[in-house]
Amino acid sequence: MPSTVRSLAIACLCALLGACSLFKFPGVHRIEVQQGNIITQEMVDQLKPGMTRRQVRFVLGTPLLEDTFEPNRWDYVNRVRSPKNEVTQKRFSVYFNGDILIATSGDWQPAGWP
């Protein structure tokens, strides 16, 4: 019998501790969560038509998505969740013809491109 009471007490304690995460206590520090690729306008401005895939990867880093059905497109996605749970998402895609950069699209535009 004492082990049943002990098990019940432990289960209740675990349930109470788990419920603490449901409340947003004032003064508790929440961090900004950033996921995906960090892309800046300065990085995008370094892109030039005719660059190779290797050069683009050097400038922007490894793409978040390399679609097997569209091998000539790389997608870079950046998602930031603020401490107030506001989500900001930005996308940037680069397009190749074979191994040569031909176009870009998304939330950033390279300087000097048509």
Image: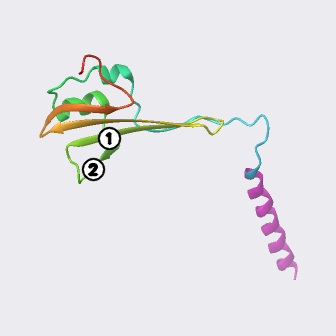
In-front residue for pair 102/9? 102
Image mark for residue 67: 2
* Quarter assignment of residue 84: top right
The answer to which of 9 and 66 lies nearer the viewer is 66
Instruction: Please report the residue visible at 20 percent of the width from the left and 23 percent of the height from the top.
Output: 48
The amino acid type of the residue labelled 2 equals: Asp
Residue at position x 82%, y 73% in the image: 8
Three-letter amino acid code of the residue under disc 1? Asp
Q: Is residue 89 above or below residue 2?
A: above
Residue topped by disc 1: 75
Nearer the N terminus, badge 1 or badge 2? 2
Magenta residues, start to end? 1-21
Where residue 62 sits, quadrant-wise, is top left
Check residue 3 for magenta coloring.
yes
Q: Residues within 10 Å of mark 2 (few under 14, many from 20)?
A: few
Q: Secondary structure at mark 1?
A: strand
Residue shown at the point (18%, 37%) measured from the top left? 96
Mark 2 element type: loop
Q: Quadrant of residue 9?
A: bottom right
Q: Main secondary structure of the magenta part?
A: helix
Tag 1 and tag 2, C-beta contact below 8 Å: yes
> Which residue is at the far top?
112
